Image: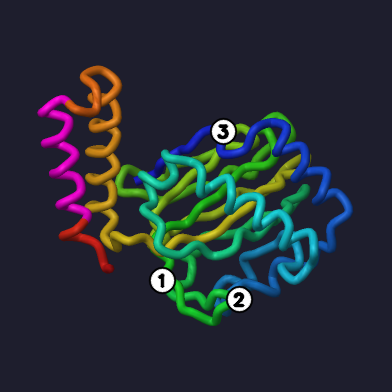
Amino acid sequence: MLIVIEKVLTQDQVAEVRDALMNAPWHDGKASAGGLAVNRKSNQQLLDSSDTAKQLQQQLLTALGGNANFISAALPHKIYPPKFNCYQQGDTYGNHIDGAIMTLPHSGESLRTDISATLFLSDPEEYQGGELTVETTYGAQPVKLAAGDMVLYPATSLHRVNPITSGERVASFFWIQSLVRDTDQRSNLYDLDQSVQSLTSVLGPEHDDVVRLSGVYHNLVRRWSDC
């Protein structure tokens, strides 16, 4: 299931991030590609060890922590510190699947990649091509969002970034280990939570049906959670 979360960053925040990245220490993105993907990847990435990266990682993590829709969709347990990449004319990243287990850089803990995330920092009119294309049971789904918007998709998905034919595509990307490992269960919980929120706005939080449905949601989280 692909879930689009709009306005994770405001336009002012996007502008701040883009300004910080303008003179950032970029390096060849192949350095972080797995063995099978290294020949499919052509882009630039921000050095994770740079002061710019650390500052922007914290800014994005703060924004994510305050975004109720992200929390509902991802049910995050651990988040890999956001990375940043830049695709220019001719750059691409061919079909690949993200690694299943990653090591968190500061703690050394393992993170199971349940969800992949891309936060767009360039508006669609700034570049041609460059669609994030995710293979789903319903076929290939191209994604090209407004700056500040983000897409979540199962990390088990085959996906690619189509070649850039003109312009520049800047984005952040990262992975989430969810409290609920199973994609279908997580999708059902998201739909249920959205319904609870919608009913709450109409009926109020103390209505019997809202309380009952909210209880169903939390009991399912309790049953399906890894924790």
Residue 211 lies in the magenta stretch: yes
Residue 14 position by quadrant: top right
Q: Which residues are magenta?
A: 207-221
Using the image, determine if residue 143 lies above or below residue 136: above
Q: Residue at x 66, y 50 (%)?
A: 59
Alpha carbon separation for disc pair 3 and 2: 28 Å
The residue shown at (24%, 32%) is 196
Along the line of sight, which residue is nearer the eye, 222 or 96?
222
What numbered label is drawn on residue 7?
3
Q: Is residue 223 magenta?
A: no
Quadrant in the rendering for residue 121: top right
Instruction: Find residue 193 and report its horizontal and vertical position in percent.
Output: 27, 38
| Above or below, 99 relative to 22 | below
Task: Report the front residue among 187 and 55.
Answer: 55
- What residue is disc 2 on? 105
* Tags 2 and 1 touching, CB below 8 Å: no
Q: Residue 189 shows which numbered tag?
A: none
Check disc 1 and report the residue beneath it: 112
**Which residue is at the far right?**
23
